[in-house]
């Protein structure tokens, strides 16, 4: 049946893993700068303050309308993780705290209400928890009973006193808005694009932390340092750079029929140099698309930039073509064309779309795009390329 969802769907568990990362990013905005965070080490998230105090956090992204009740597995599974850590950390001698972050609410009348904020003392919590456990026949909860029996009465009270439930935490799709509210120093129209870049960087950072042989701490300061760097890219004289180190698939200099590639073959350039040109074209083209989708460039800005490039190209072409005549040999034409192309690659970093946009592929790729314009390229390298193209177009017509 179309639209049916299997009872074994991986959507909810998958969403839970993404939620851990996204919610952890949100929490970074509210933590001290000298705090460190671990993902999936002793719990879903682990916060370590500069003085060594540890808070373990379990994160649960539940279906809309879900509630936590006395025997909710989410709570008791977390308790089992926590009680084992509590014992290993020195029990009452440790300073560890435990938090259950859940998008679910707590059922009215449940003893779990004692754990919301300062709802009850350890003694009250321990007694209510023992009563709830006694009523359960669940094998899963039975494992928790066995672990809790290893605590003395005083330790149990101390342990439960360290637990907090944070119900109705923001859902995964609410978090971008909440982070947006923490970016008030950034222009409103730039915040969405900045958040996307921040979250992309954060996801890469989390992956690296998880793939280390030993779980690596993420420092809160790292997030704010990255935020400063990203914010700089959204100032009036700058633009974000997203395609550095990115390459298109299936680069084939020998068989690429695009006009800018044909132009480079006319100069008899090596496949390696043409490959670099294809990469520059790809990065510049895709970067412009990203800027446009995020509304980061103003109307006419690209057109004005291209006019500047064409004018500078025309001025330099006049110098390098000065001795090229109708009788010039092909070798002389190729030499002049190579010199003009080399100028475009190496001597134009000052021709920036904005003052602080100094990434090389932006200008190099812009020249490749101008060399690819149809039906007639707006820049060319070989002095006779346009004549040859006109003959080809005339034949085709």
Image (cartoon, grey):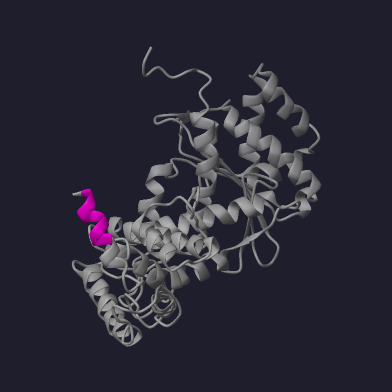
The percent coordinates of residue 203 (x first, y second) are 53, 52
Q: Nearer the viewer, residue 175 or 357?
A: 357
Question: Could you tell me which residue is drawn at 70 percent across and 19 percent down?
Answer: 139
Prevailing SS of the magenta stretch: helix
Would residue 242 be visible to someone looking at this image?
no
- State whether residue 26 is above or below residue 155: below
Q: How many marks?
A: 0
- Asked whether 282 or 110 is in front, the reply is 282
Depicted 324 relative to depicted 211: above or below: below
Find residue 191 and report its image quarter: bottom left
Above or below for 359 versus 58: below
Residue 235 is one of the magenta-drawn residues: no
Q: Is residue 75 left or right of residue 362?
A: right
The residue under the point 23% across, 75% down is 307
Q: What is the span of residues highlighted in magenta in the rendered image?
A: 389-396
Q: Nearer the viewer, residue 198 or 321?
A: 321
- Residue 392 drawn in magenta: yes
Give coordinates of residue 387: x percent, y percent: 26, 66
Asked if one can make out residue 389 in the rendered structure from this viewpoint, the answer is: yes
**Left/right of residue 81 with respect to residue 286 in the rendered view:** right
Image quadrant where residue 385 sits: bottom left
Residue name at image x 76 percent, y 40 percent: 84
The location of residue 278, given as percent across then percent down, is: 45, 59
Tell me where residue 276 appears, x and y as whole percent.
50, 64
Q: Is 120 above or below relative to 334?
A: above
- Considering the image in quadrants, where does the N terminus appear? top left
Residue found at the far top of this picture: 1
């Amino acid at each position: 049946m179309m639209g049916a969802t299997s009872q074994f769907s991986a959507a909810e568990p998958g969403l839970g893993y993404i939620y851990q990362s996204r919610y952890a990013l949100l929490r970074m905005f509210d933590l001290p700068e000298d705090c460190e965070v671990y993902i999936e080490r002793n719990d879903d998230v682990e916060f370590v303050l500069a003085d060594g105090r540890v808070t373990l956090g379990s994160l649960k992204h539940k279906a809309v309308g879900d509630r936590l009740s006395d025997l909710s597995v989410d709570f008791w599974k977390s308790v089992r993780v926590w009680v084992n850590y509590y014992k290993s950390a020195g029990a009452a001698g440790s300073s560890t705290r435990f938090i259950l972050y859940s998008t679910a609410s707590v059922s009215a009348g449940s003893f779990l209400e004692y754990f919301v904020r300062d709802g009850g003392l350890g003694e009250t919590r321990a007694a209510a928890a023992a009563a709830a456990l006694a009523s359960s026949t669940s094998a899963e909860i039975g494992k928790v009973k066995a672990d809790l029996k290893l605590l003395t009465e005083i330790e149990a009270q101390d342990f439960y006193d360290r637990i907090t439930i944070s119900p109705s935490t923001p859902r995964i799709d609410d978090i971008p808005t909440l982070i947006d509210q923490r970016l008030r120093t950034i222009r409103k129209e730039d915040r969405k694009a900045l958040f996307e870049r921040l979250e992309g960087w954060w996801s890469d950072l989390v992956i690296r932390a998880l793939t280390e042989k030993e779980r690596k701490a993420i420092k809160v300061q790292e997030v704010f340092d990255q935020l400063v760097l990203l914010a700089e890219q959204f100032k009036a004289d700058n633009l974000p750079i997203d395609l550095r180190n990115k390459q298109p698939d299936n680069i084939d200099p020998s068989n690429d029929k695009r006009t800018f590639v044909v132009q480079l073959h006319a100069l008899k350039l090596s496949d390696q140099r043409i490959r670099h040109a294809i990469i520059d074209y790809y990065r510049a083209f895709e970067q412009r698309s990203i800027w446009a989708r995020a509304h980061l460039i103003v109307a006419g800005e690209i057109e004005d930039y291209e006019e500047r490039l064409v004018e500078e190209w025309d001025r330099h072409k006049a110098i390098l073509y000065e001795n090229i005549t109708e009788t010039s040999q092909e070798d002389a034409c190729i030499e002049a064309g190579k010199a003009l192309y080399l100028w475009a690659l190496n001597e134009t970093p000052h021709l920036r779309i904005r003052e602080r946009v100094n990434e090389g592929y932006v200008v190099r790729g812009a020249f490749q795009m101008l060399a690819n314009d149809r039906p007639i390229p707006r820049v060319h390298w070989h002095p006779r390329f346009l004549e040859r193209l006109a003959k080809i177009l005339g034949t085709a017509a």
